[in-house]
Amino acid sequence: MCGIVAYVGKKQAYPIIIKGLHRLEYRGYDSAGVALLKEEIFIYKKKGKVSVLEQHVEGKNIESCIGIGHTRWATHGEPNDENAHPHFSGSTDIAMIHNGIIENYAPLKKELIKRGHQFLSETDTEVLVHLIEDIQQKEKVTLVEAVRMALNGVIGAYAIVVMSKNDPETLIIAKKSSPLVVGLGENNSEFFIASDATPIVEYTKNVVYLEDEEIAVLTPGKEMHLMNIKKQEKTPYIQQLELNLEAIEKGGFEHFMLKEIYEQPRSIRDSFRGRLNVNDGIVSLGGILDYEQKMMNAQRIIFVACGTSWHAGLVGEYLFEDLARIPVEVEYASEFRYRNPIINENDVVIAISQSGETADTLAAIELAKSKGATIIGVCNVVGSSISRATHGGSYTHAGPEIGVASTKAFTAQVTVLTLMALRLGFKRGTIPQSRFRQLLSELNSIPDKIQKLLNHSDENIKCISSVFKEAKNFLYLGRNYTFPVALEGALKLKEISYIHAEGYPAAEMKHGPIALIDEEMPVVVIAVKGASYEKVVSNIQEVKARRGKIIAVVTEGDVLAKDLADYAIEVPETDELLSPLISVIPLQLLSYHIAVMRGCNVDQPRNLAKSVTVE
Ligand code: G6P
């Protein structure tokens, strides 16, 4: 949450920062602001998106080779101009941007007010920048030392960039629990700072990811000076970015979400590339090899995740129990971390996260680690905090996902979990050889099947969307492997079209939600071929008897469910175990088209953010 961009070097900072803020808008879009330095520090900030800030800045003097910029997802204080970042210190000599939460800001603020400080906003960030200046003046220390001392006194999460009028060629940055990456210009001639690498990739491939409690001083012409808040010197570890520019642009699609839905044949193939060998009947996952025995002998596997990643975890539960016969629990990371869970050294925790930055998931990992469990990550963003906090893991390789509503990350997570379940089942001898081979071959054919679905179903889904675009509520039903898909379908619709939607296990419907069904209620039923097909058909009958409108996702060639349904979307046939990978696609498209028809901002839905780095 909140995106940070900063630049210091010889180029004009403003265009670099604005472009970067657009790329980071997925992290929050309640307000945006920049601070630039020309003898004095000038701050321009506005409630709303980065484009509003751009209009506000038009005609103003924006010349500066140093600057900091921020796009906000509000935590402390409502979204308005005053609470927008950057924030000034009391003297206006220092400006700062911040991503995270300073949990003890209230007592700090009280103390500072007693000492005569006046605050213009309700933010925790303004308290921190005042504290830094207060320490600097009181202790007569350098700015970096004041930053260090202040950070020793705060509780919470931060990624900050500090700029001072008195040192116009230097940026001071620091982080704890919120991400921060530095791009290094040739011979340290310039530095790019951002919450993730997307604003940096077009300028340099050499980056340093800051570790928790590290502070860096960046002055062009000098090497990056890195230390931790205990004042220990550190050597920056320079990595090469693998990201390319094309991957973070829309490539002719109207929205990132649509592009990402259409990318799924490729992204799923990338997830199993080099890991799935159909000819030789092998699944290999290098990143978990060292922990494979531990996983095979685990007393229990616990998936921890949030949002869509939690839904992928539910699919994982079915797969792991079915194929590897290991007991699995799926936990919301936010609940798990606070309910004193019973964990021991024989447990394996699998953390699933697209961004690899979700604060609750990260905290759940630390908790399980402290109790001796082995932690495996399933992350999309390479080098992210979660991928670094885990013992081992497998990247999903879906490529950057920019649309706030997750699509290709979900199918890539399910693909990786399928590979893990297959590998563990094979090693434990819980899958017969022939079945193992059959599933490998079927998984290999999934990208082509999705491609076929994408080629043929869009018009039909658009028509269905136009019929139901004004509905007030939706019910999504699935059973067995498609129950998590029903949850995911409902979440997608809620997120981007703001229509209330519930996902339910089809059979559970009669224990409550059936009371809601009338002729106004569209019910999306995933009725693909599988062990519970007939039962789902009966559930469709129950909805029809109450005059509900059925939109059924059915297997190609299906007659029974298709005939009963008011509207049907056909999907290619696959093994039931892999059906989530295919049946989720029409639900993604349905929510996309409904949201577009309702005039919603598909890529940046209200109140949401893609990377939730606050608890
Ligand atoms: C936010 C996003 C969701 C995502 C969830 C978990 O709520 O809007 O799309 O599923 O966070 O994020 P993660 O990066 O951990 O998968």
Image (cartoon, rainbow, N blue to C red):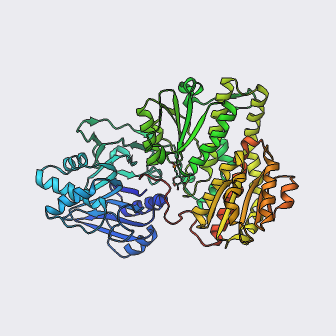
Does residue 376 show up? yes
Q: Nearer the viewer, residue 237 or 572?
A: 572
* Residue 379 drawn above or below residue 465: above
Residue plotted at (29% across, 48% down): 155
Q: Position of residue 127 (x, y in %)?
A: 25, 59
Q: Nearer the viewer, residue 92 or 394?
A: 394
Residue plotted at (43% across, 48% down): 359
- Residue 226, quarter of the rendered image: top left
Q: Nearer the viewer, residue 92 or 340?
A: 340
Q: Is residue 529 left or right of residue 612?
A: right
Q: Position of residue 121 (x, y in %)?
A: 29, 67
Q: Position of residue 528 (x, y in %)?
A: 78, 50
Q: Nearer the viewer, residue 67 or 288?
A: 288
* Residue 292 drawn above or below residue 271: above
Q: Position of residue 191 (x, y in %)?
A: 35, 50
Residue at the limit of the structure toward the bottom, as seen here: 59
* Residue 548 drawn above or below residue 312: below
Q: Is residue 243 left or right of residue 591?
A: left
